[in-house]
Image (cartoon, rainbow, N blue to C red):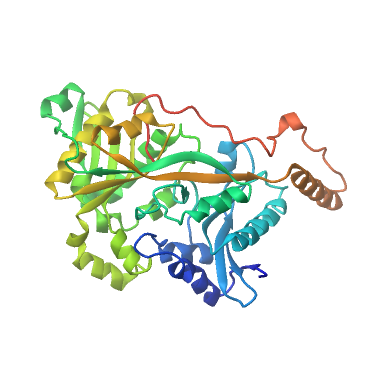
Amino acid sequence: MTVTVEQVSTRAALDEFIAMPLGLQPRNLAVPLLEASIRSWFTGRSPHPEPIDLLLARDSSGTVVGRTTSHTDRRLDAKFGERLQLFGATEFRDGEAASALFAELDRRARARSGGSADALFGPVSLLPNQAGGVITSGFGERGFVDSAWNDEFVPIVYEAEGFERWGEADTWLVEMGAAPAAEPTPAEWAAAGLTLAHGSKREMKRLVPELLTLLNASFAQLPYYTEISAAEMASATDGLTFLLDEQLLLLARDSASGRAVAFVLVVPDITEFVQRVGGRLGPLHQVQLLLTRGRYRREAILVIQGTDPERQGQGILSLLSRQLQANLVAGGYRALRSTYVGRDNPASTAQFARFGGRTLHGYTFYRRPLQQGQALDARAAAAGDSADARGAVAPPPTTAARPTAAAPPPAAPPPTSEGATP
């Protein structure tokens, strides 16, 4: 079978890109990306600061057998200290389709403006701290919104193609009542110099910028985290008011200053609805969800939690976690799922274990270096093109001055206390 790869350039091809995984994956396990997000990538209306190309793989009959995005982000390059060709929303029918997609990504990486990329990295949609990843275990457990699900052959294909695991992590499941959780008393909050606050739907416009500041500070120490812009935060929280259960957005405020020093954001789990509508959350489906939202208050998803670095190690997240458990039980929730938490973040995973939680899916990203010769040849070609335009060629950087393509990205030290959870 011959597989070719093309860039999505028409609305018809965009529809094929959106539909491709719906016919490939079991709907009761996989969770489709929201169609609105994909369309924003195609139209350029996404808040992502750099272009996003959508790619389709077709077999010799014209049938779509794979898809991926191709994009870059200078913020992540700066964080890792190397130039990365990113890819995401990646699905493939078999190893041949995957190989064709990765070959096209390699070609694009070598042709990157300013010189070759050092490695392919993904799947990320659009950054590691937004969504993406591949599960490496727990294939019989369903996925959930803001997390990945894939068949067990997927990590086998990545590794057969020369990719190495990066940032291994786990998703978690906590069943209510699995372990006792005592709600913090007013005296405990007062002794910590804290005031408990809840999110309010009416105050979300004021609250989101405050959360953004705390979010970026909490996560800055993690090796994959790139600072989220105001536009990206606005996009990520679009519709949050619609979904929010106010008892599940908790903030710990410093009693003296009123400043938020830690937070936990949990939302009702609407995965079943998203699966049923194939990721299409248009106005009609939003009305349907609103009318049936009580049905989706049985389980919840921990989207994000974090503590101001200056206040870590003081037990604040433990207080919030206990309060969260009490609120979940009071609200009739049966289970809490958490998006992936790095295995180098024991303080956060300890919170789940304390309440009787268990790991749900093994999780990873993948990195594959471009061959050293390919990267150098591409850089030399880029330098030659520049010479034609300017009449001079700057000397290439020495080996000591630039990251080696085969070297893994540097990892920041793991949090030593209650840090951030992705």
Residue 2 quadrant: bottom right
Residues 302 and 253: in front is: 302
Q: Residue 280: where, in percent of width, then height?
A: 37, 69
The residue that appears at 63% across and 47% down in the rendered structure is 162
Residue at the extreme right = 391
The residue that appears at 77% across and 49% down in the rendered structure is 378
Q: Is residue 126 left or right of residue 376?
A: left
Question: Would residue 308 be visible to someone looking at this image?
Answer: no
The residue that appears at 46% across and 34% down in the rendered structure is 222
Quarter occupied by the N terminus: bottom right
Residues 98 and 420: in front is: 98
Quarter occupied by the C terminus: top left
Q: Residue 376: where, in percent of width, then height?
A: 78, 43
The residue that appears at 66% across and 68% down in the rendered structure is 4
Position of residue 93 relative to residue 124, above or below, is: below
Residue 189 quadrant: top left
Q: Residue 279: where, in percent of width, then height?
A: 38, 65
Q: Is residue 146 left or right of residue 286?
A: right
Question: Would residue 188 be visible to someone looking at this image?
Answer: yes
Position of residue 166 relative to residue 195, above or below, is: below
How many circles with numbers are drawn on the protein? 0
